[in-house]
Image: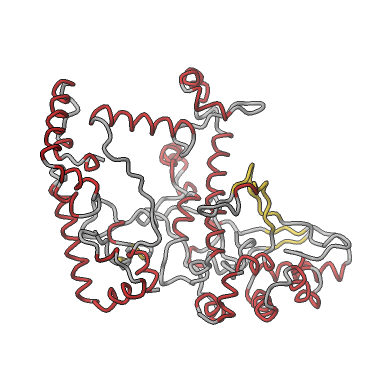
Amino acid sequence: MLELFGNGDASAQGTSESAHERCNRRRERRAKQREQPSLRNDALQLFGDGDASAEGMSESAHECRNHLRRESCAKQREHPSLCNDALQLFGDEDASAPGRWDCGEMDTICGFCNAKMWITERLAKSNNHPQFSLCCENGKVLLPNLPTTPQKLEVLLTSKESSAVKFRDRIRMYNSVLAFTSFGAKVDESVTGGPGPYSFRFQGELYHKIGSLCPTEGQRAQFAQLYIHDTKREHQNGHDVMPSLDPTTLDWLLTMMYNINPYVEVFKMARDMMATEGAPMDLKLLSLLLEQRMPADIMCRRPMKSLH
Amino acid sequence: MALHYPLLFLYGEDGWHPNIQLNGVIADADLDEDHVEESELQRKHCNVTMAEFYSYRLQHRDTNGIALLRGGRLRQQYIVDAYVAIEQNRLKYLRLNKKKLRVDIYQGLQDAIVAGDTNVVAIGQRIILPSSFIVGPRHMVQNYQDAMAICRWAGCLDAFVTFTCNPQWLEIRRALLLR
């Protein structure tokens, strides 16, 4: 904030000074600015070298910044091709702008949670052993890893093939066909689709609704009903809900869901029971309390199911 | 969350729930009964909050599956959904803990900052968002007053700079290329 005013002297500890002194200083400063118009320009180049010369910065901040700059220069020497590639790819003039400050690569690994961070994101007092509060609150939060994504889904998410690109373009539609719950909120349509960044506004609360387990008569099965309704017709149902989706991809995704998603199994079991007993029943989805689990296998266990 | 985003959480991974313990914090159950009172005092923050949970989840880790990271638009939807959940949770806390937050002492303040409060008039009971609720009227008023205090001390503004993260920054684009 102080640098913003482009005055080294503004940072002199002056809270207890009298108003008179402050006034004088302000006058001096204005005079200085008239003499040295470049000072003002320095202030505008907040992230260029200009601010580094501001007198107000403490010694340690100087050191730290210089150290970082040296580091990033060294990195550029090590991987010149990498930087050049990036430049060529985007034809970026911005990168070569004089005085542009570079915060380096996202290559620091958080010692606690393995998250990839930029070195400049570290906590202020952790110069030798960078610590981060953004990812895991300095090791206080520790959650199980997400399991590896199946090979074929990984291809769909990363490849440049046209089918994969189409899939990514409509990933939200694919997801809503496969989802068990629907989205409930009073959405304000007046701001969607307007100029500027995408916005989404709603009133009240947002819900994930899990509807009745059987479709009402005359209606198509959707969401969780897809998994409970009728095995033979599931795939057809999926296509009916969103006709614009690619049937092969959707078929494959449904098969994958059947093979690995634990909730599908629960719903299938409920359906089988309904078919054999023919009576209405309640289905409760419960999750084991954390205390009852071993820390390492939180994700591995299936949710507990109970049928009444 | 896993029920709503089956493509991001194929294996039905757990979402947030109130009983995830912070790493290195002793559970209440492990303490003797004599220490229960002591632990009451320390209990302020021993479970993972919703915000902590989601900020942990959204980081890039090489050891994790890539579905959540590469979800594209679905990931963006997930982020919005998560933030809404966080904010709803905070608002719910304010609504249910009026006594603890001593809402009645706000009464005098109310007259001073009438302008900020006009939107909060609800049918039934009035709920006042404290200044710790980000983007609430009280928070905004405090920010404004802080800014004015700086002006008073340092003089008129030369430049007013707002700072927003730009996805076109070279550092960000380089990180995306490397993936």
- Image vertical order of residue A195 relative to residue A28, above or below: below
- Image vertical order of residue A224 relative to residue B52, above or below: below
- Image vertical order of residue A104 relative to residue B99, above or below: below
Q: How many marks?
A: 0
Q: Quadrant of the C terminus of chain A?
A: bottom right
Q: Residue at x 56, y 44 (%)?
A: B89
Q: Is residue A253 left or right of residue B138?
A: right
Give percent across and percent down for residue A266: 71, 67
- Image vertical order of residue A46 relative to residue B154, above or below: below
Q: Is residue B154 left or right of residue A212?
A: left
In the image, A124 versus A5, the foreground residue is: A5
Q: Quadrant of residue B174?
A: bottom left
Q: Quadrant of residue A69?
A: bottom left
Give percent across and percent down for residue A166: 59, 75
Give percent across and percent down for residue B5: 61, 63
Q: Residue at x 67, y 64 (%)?
A: A176
Q: Quadrant of the N terminus of chain A?
A: top left
Q: Can see residue A99? A: yes
Give percent across and percent down for residue B24: 39, 54
In the image, A76 versus B6, the foreground residue is: A76
In the image, B131 versus B151, the foreground residue is: B151
Q: Can see residue A258? A: no
In the image, B117 versus A274, the foreground residue is: B117
